[in-house]
Amino acid sequence: MREQQVSEIWAEVLALPEVDVDANFYDLGGHSLLLIELVGRLNQKLGIETDIVTVLEHPTVVEFTAHWNSLPATGGDR
């Protein structure tokens, strides 16, 4: 998974022109409702199965991407 793709989705959800890969989702104005939207878009646009807890544990683009890149190809958090 590429950081650029994740960063673009983060930016869409937060209605920002761009998102720094090291910026925390909540520091950028994210909240619980946007978190739900973010998870839905990540799953839909990237074809993955992530959840709210995973984003809470990895709240930056770089952390989230590193986490997903470290998972086996059959993937998923469960």
Image (cartoon, rainbow, N blue to C red):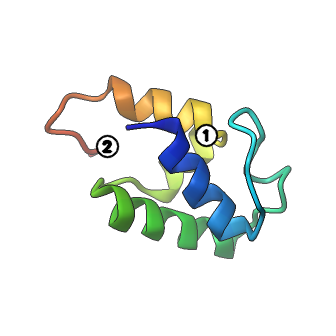
Give the structural element (helix, strand or loop) at label 2: loop
Q: Which residue is mark 1?
A: 61
Percent across and percent down for residue 59 are: 65, 43
Examine the image and state in which quarter residue 16 appears: bottom right
Q: Quadrant of the N terminus?
A: top left
Instruction: Please identify, in this view, whether the residue under mark 2 or under mark 1 is nearer the observer.
Output: 1
Percent across and percent down for residue 69 are: 36, 28
Give the structural element (helix, strand or loop) at label 1: helix
Residue in view at x 20 percent, y 28 percent: 72
> Cα distance, mark 2 to mark 1?
17 Å
Residue in view at x 85 percent, y 50 percent: 27
Percent across and percent down for residue 58 are: 59, 38
Q: Residues within 10 Å of mark 1 (few under 14, many from 20)?
A: many
Q: Which numbered dot is residue 77?
A: 2
Kindly identify the amino acid type of the residue bearing the numbered disc 2: Asp
Q: Is residue 27 above or below residue 42?
A: above
- In the picture, measured across the screen, residue 42 lies left or right of residue 57, that is left
Q: Earlier in the sequence, mark 2 or mark 1?
A: 1
